[in-house]
Amino acid sequence: MMMLIPRTETSTGWQIATPIMAVLATMITGGLLFAIMGYDPVAAIRTIFWDPLFGPAASYSRPQLLVKAGPLILIASGLAIGFRAGIWNIGAEGQYIIGGICGAAVALAAYPGEHWWLFPAMIAAGAFGGWAWAMIPAMLRNRFGASEILVSLMLVYVAQKVAAWMAFGPLKNPEGFGFPGSRNLQQYPSASNPELIAGTGAHWGVFAAALAVLATWVLMSRHIRGFHIRAAGLAPRAARFAGVRPETLVAFCLGLSGALAGLAGIFEAAGPAGQITDSFGSGYGFTAIIVAFLGRLNPVGILLAGLLLALTYIGGELAQLTMQLPAATVQVFQGMLLFFLLGFDLLTRFRITRGVPA
Amino acid sequence: MIDLTTLIPMLMAASTPILFAALGELIVERAGVLNLGVEGMMIVGALAGFATAVATGNPYLGFVAAAVAGAAVSMVFALLTQVLLANQVASGLALTMFGLGLAALFGKAYEGIKAPAMGPGPLGLNWIVWLGLASVPAIWWFLNRTRPGLILRGVGENHDAAHGLGHPVRRVRTGAIAFGGAMAGIGGAFISIAIVLQWTEGMTAGAGWIALAIVVFSNWTAPGVLAGAWLFGGVTVLQLRLQAAGVAVPVQLLSMAPYLATILVLVLISARQKFSRRAGLGAPGSLGQNFHALR
Amino acid sequence: MKRRQLLASAAALGAMSLAIPAFAQDEKLKVGFIYVGPVGDGGWTYQHDLGRQAIEAEYGDKIETTFIESVPEGADAERALTQLALAGNKLIFATSFGFMDAVVNVAAKFPDVKFEHATGYKRADNVATYDARFYEGRAVIGTIAGRMTKSNKIGYIGSFPIPEVIQGINSAYIHAKKVNPDVEMKVVWVYSWFDPAKEADAAAALIAEGVDVFMQHTDSTAPLAKAQEAGALGFGQASDMANFAPSPRISSIIDNWAPYYIKRVGAALDGSWKSEGTWAGIGDGEVVIGEITETVPAEVKAEAEALRDQIASGAYHPFTGPLKKADGSDWLAEGAVASDEELSGMNFFVEGITAQIPQ
């Protein structure tokens, strides 16, 4: 009989080996899927994993990896801190939307004036919007004991409706012939978040994501608050005796992850997306949860996981383009990749031994 | 202005898909598992049900197939969370993605075909609507009046204690997940077989996410799920009816209302639990946590 | 994007496309499409993909087509368009309004690639726009609806309150009223192009208000399924929806992009392509009235077909005065016809429609 024995220390060797095993397993099963569908499996897998990085048009798609991975990494870094402490913010999608709306609203209020302070003000408003939206579940948990998992999830739906309301109402472009959606901020120089170095895809949000990875790494490994967070996650009761106030932690973790999600929202609204529409929330907030777990709640892991996910998105598009692989096939393939990554993760936390149940 | 005798049957039919899915998720969450893959299981059920209804000419067999398919795809989630101890939130999200893709992939062959019509049952509503309604007291009875229901609640409330009493925590949860998948599958099939009569990609259009909200609104009780399904379905139906009657309604603001109501309910219940220490209310104690027996 | 960066990145991209001769050498004209939905949506995207298949059938070996489906609007659209351009596509069709800014941005970086954007209003030297005069078709089915209603209440399931949909509602109402002065129009907005469950509820809401014939500007067959159950009548939208004929689907309004796509690909092949805004209707075969079934009496069918032919020949414009706005103010004088500018920004109902346009 097989038995699982928890590892006392997570195994470094396995931490590196399991994602590779998971990707290989996905390639094998995905290859089978492609073959059954009548596509060349080797070409399909090369198109998805290799071509975005080293293919003929890679000088364009490599930077696009950053554009796609930036918001995922930015949001996931914040979420992971809460998850480490056992504080479950699954409403980052809502915080992302509200952050985008708040920042865009500042820009639209100032339109068409050109001010040096406008972009910084938008960033502040975006972070504030995300923070405030996340403080709702934080407050409700601290005051009334309401589950932050559920409140934050419910607030995603509310935020989506707010986005629709804004796109059709207060933020609607007055020169847009009645079509829903705000003015395009890419065409408003003071408010736009452009590619900073041509050909790299890197806009302010990408730098913010890199900074977030660094800052969360410092916080978690060098700062007393990081120690508290880890302690609270591992042994809540002991942490309380050690003087960690759970209310403070809840507010800190939710607020921080909300602010980062809000930042991702405004960088996206002012940059790649350009405007607030009724479909502004495009799932980054949910995908970031997966990224946080694939990255094992570790800043460096999150960086790699975000890039891997972005790779499958961009590679999937390329496979559609060059091989006419249906979008659905790509989606199934991504689903399998996630399953394998989540499943194989077991090996880092447990040892499998052969034994008899005690 | 609005005729209740037409509003209520309309509401009952409109809320059937979310009622089934939410009743299934209720059992799952009562067992302590949070499965965010409802949307994925619904769409798989919608396709499997449709395909079977077309192949056999019998819509009711379609619902059976949808239940089987929903349960089958939910086993991926069960394997991940119960055996491989992966995080439930991430696994559920992955399941939604996988299910949407899988259904779209196999659905290509069924585009542009029409399903066999379902005959109306009592009061002009088909039998599946009534089955959904009948499931509410049945699930209430199961949870509150039977021993397996008691064990299921125990597992969800405190898995360590349940394990200590000798209950098979993971087996109970796997069973609950399968049931949740089957119910979500039926709910999805209701959309393809009874509402649209055709298969189209992405046809569940977010119904699975509404089902998740309803379970919270219900305070994890079967009658609450019914009330929630009618509230969420009712707001949509009512705003459309008001529009048809020529009343200008702030659609977005109105459609936010049920979610705000859900938060309010959750807060009130949590507060009552916190301040008066009444047990047996609110979210299951072990919701979302994985269980690993150390002994 | 700031001008300097724009130039810098255009240069970078230009250098890049030179660096990949494998893609650029093809003698075939490569034609790319980006779709907002899946090709299997049975509606909007499906019809565009039929247009793509039509150009393949027409030009055979001379062209090669590629498409990317289910592309979200915004940053993803920009990337999909760029990748199509980098892959050597010289003519790219973007088939959703929401791709507008992405098309304009990408077109600026690829001056030698021709772009065609459906339903938008921004053009450039290498960006043409095209749209269909759906309101012409609405006039025909509005006539049928006005004749077929017994309750004198007809309904309209609107997607979003945008000019294209408002034109359709007005056109349908004007022509229903012409043949049936007692007709009333009920409007329901579902705020989605595709949400079967909600569309079914919208149909049910209209039926409960006494509507017995309705039109839809949403893509699923759910309203027709509901009509079938309730004994009401409806029309196919975007695609023919012939599965529901002869009743409840009594006719349909079909988006037929094939003639336009064939014409534009032909122009690109012989070098006569230039940027322009095309707004074609029944006469050009872009809006097609599907078969009018035997449920409709022969004289009504003949009347509808006569109207269709008059519109096709240009003898009649569906928005011909005298017409007033819903607020009672004058719009078009006797014999005057609406200009295209007025129509493309239409944000009011005509006199007689009591519903409000949500603001």
Image (spheres, coloured by chain):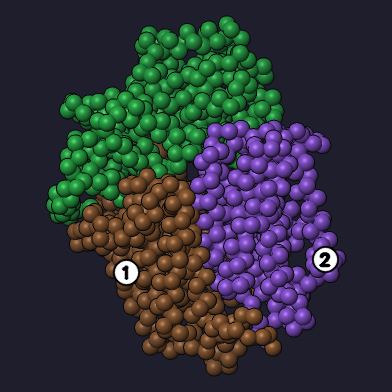
Chain colours: A brown, B purple, C green
Quadrant for residue A261, please give it.
bottom left
Q: Residues within 10 Å of mark 1 (few under 14, many from 20)?
A: some
Q: Are marks 1 and 2 on the same chain?
A: no
Q: Residues within 10 Å of mark 2 (few under 14, many from 20)?
A: few
Picture residue at 37% right of the left edge, 81% below the top? A217
Q: Nearer the viewer, residue A278 or C183?
A: A278
Badge 2 amino acid? Asn
Q: Secondary structure at mark 1?
A: helix
Residue C6: x, y in percent?
Answer: 18, 51
Q: Which mark is residue A208?
A: 1
Distance Cα–Cα, label 1 vs label 2: 51 Å
**In this orientation, does residue C3 appear?**
no
Depth-wise, is mark 1 or mark 2 nearer the camera?
2
Q: Nearer the viewer, residue A123 or C73?
A: C73
Identify the residue under disc 2: B144
Picture residue at 75% right of the left edge, 70% below the top? B153
Check the residue under mark 2 and report the chain it is in: B
Q: Is residue C241 left or right of residue C52?
A: right
Residue B53: x, y in percent?
Answer: 67, 39
